[in-house]
Image (spheres, grey):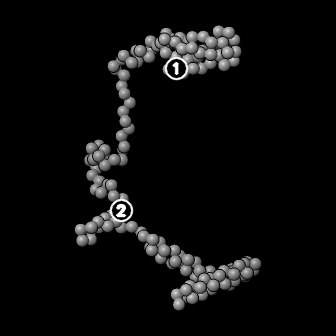
Amino acid sequence: MLVNCNSCQKKFIVPDAAITKSGRLVQCGSCGSKWTQYPIIEKIKKVEKIIKNPNIKKKRAKKNLYSPEYLRKKHGLVIENSNDAVEQKTYGGKTKKNSFGFYSYLIILFIFLSTLFGILHLTKQMIIQKYPFSEIYIDYFYDVINIIKTSILLFLN
């Protein structure tokens, strides 16, 4: 609702719900004058019509188009184990989920790093011929690998 100050004619925007039928005391933020503001009658009548009109449809909740119930009802599709993203196997009456565990990730990381190390070892001479400044870095890398290898061997013994 747009409210005008009676003294300085400044305009203010006030929410419609803030001013009730009985009116409300408002104060101008610019000049400080106070007056009782009543709601505009046309807007009250529109709101009353909306409240009294039984033909107004309420908003429906959105349907999940990918839920198993909706797919079965609408398209005749039956999805088995829709709640389980991972297959389950039974061992002696217990269900166990198939997953890629920590040690599997560790083994894959070890294989990946050893493959990279092997490729670097095979192409070491070609890299040094093409980029001569990289020889120092490759030597440092081999030194670090040797230090790690000896420390692991000392720890195991």
Where residue 40 sits in the image (x, y, percent)?
A: 52, 11
Q: Position of residue 12 (x, y in %)?
A: 62, 18
Q: Which of the pair 151/1 is nearer the observer?
A: 151
User: In the image as oriented, which residue stretches furthest toward the left?
Assistant: 93
| Mark 2 residue element | loop
**Label 1 secondary element:** helix
User: Which quadrant holds the N terminus?
Assistant: top right
From the viewer's side, name the closer residue of 132 and 45: 45
Mark earlier in primary sequence (1, 2): 1
Q: Nearer the viewer, residue 62 or 37?
A: 37
Q: Which residue is mark 2?
A: 86
Residue at point 57% right, 14% down?
25
**Residue 123 can be seen, yes or no:** no
Please give the count of numbered marks on the rendered protein.
Answer: 2
Can residue 78 be seen here? The reply is: yes
Residue identifier under label 1? 18
Instruction: Name the residue at the bottom extreme.
Output: 157
Residue drawn where x is 34% and y is 65% of the image = 97
Work out whether 62 lies above or below 143: above
